[in-house]
Image: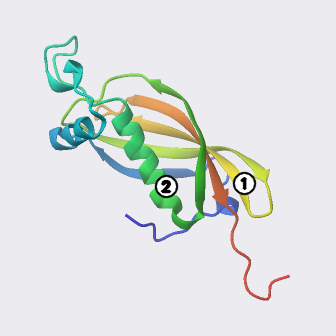
Amino acid sequence: MTSTTNYWYEDLLPGMLLTLPDIDCSAERIGRHSELFGAFHPINTSSDNRFGRAIAHGPHPVAQAMASVGNLLSDSLVAMGQLGPWRFLSPAFVGDVLTADATVIGRSGGGKSQGQIIFEVRVIAPDNQVSQIGEAHLIVRRRPRQEGAA
């Protein structure tokens, strides 16, 4: 997915909310996550656990949310400076479709060409409760100067 809007450092003001695409925790997606990372813990592969259902790997929704933020920022994203603190408040179950959003909670200069944006990222369970919440500190480019601009 490529963003049709470029969000530059100047555009990302405290309080701005970005709605992220849904997070797919289907058995197929969680299976691919398990294969990729060699993560086959029984809590993620069996319903024989304290939840009575297999749960999605905690990092899976984090990774999908952060990929979505990166896709929305598109050309302006330079790098991630920090991820966290991150809190896991409730499980995401295999088969769930989660929603997510990212709110700008801070900014700092940094240089003529870029600055740091701090997002609070929330992953929301199907029952509309916050399942995960954390911070992402991203280095974002400033808007390019127009040719001939002073």
**First in sequence: mark 2 vs mark 1:** 2
In the displayed structure image, the side of residue 137 where residue 45 appears, left or right: left
Q: Which mark is residue 42?
A: none
Residue 115 vs residue 33, the one in the foreground = 33
Q: Which mark is residue 70?
A: 2
Q: Position of residue 29 (x, y in %)?
A: 22, 43
Residue occupying the point 52% across, 33% down: 134
**Kind of element beneath mark 1:** strand
What's the amino acid at mark 2?
Gly
Note whether 135 is above or below 23 in the view shown. Answer: above
In the displayed structure image, the side of residue 32 where residue 20 appears, left or right: right
What's the amino acid at mark 1?
Gly
Q: Residue 74: in sight, yes or no?
A: yes
Q: Position of residue 109 (x, y in %)?
A: 78, 52
Could you classify mark 1 by the number of other residues whose Cα lies within 10 Å: few (under 14), some (14-19), or many (20 or more)? Answer: some
Residue 49 vs residue 41, the one in the foreground = 41
Image quarter of the C terminus: bottom right
Note whether 140 is above or below 49 in the view shown. Answer: below
Q: Residue 14: in sight, yes or no?
A: no
Residue 99 vs residue 57, the one in the foreground = 57
Asked if the residues shown at circle 2 and circle 1 are in contact, with their CB atoms under 8 angstroms apart, the answer is no
Residue occupying the point 28% across, 35% down: 126
Residue occupying the point 72% across, 59% down: 114
Could you classify mark 2 by the number of other residues whose Cα lies within 10 Å: few (under 14), some (14-19), or many (20 or more)? Answer: many
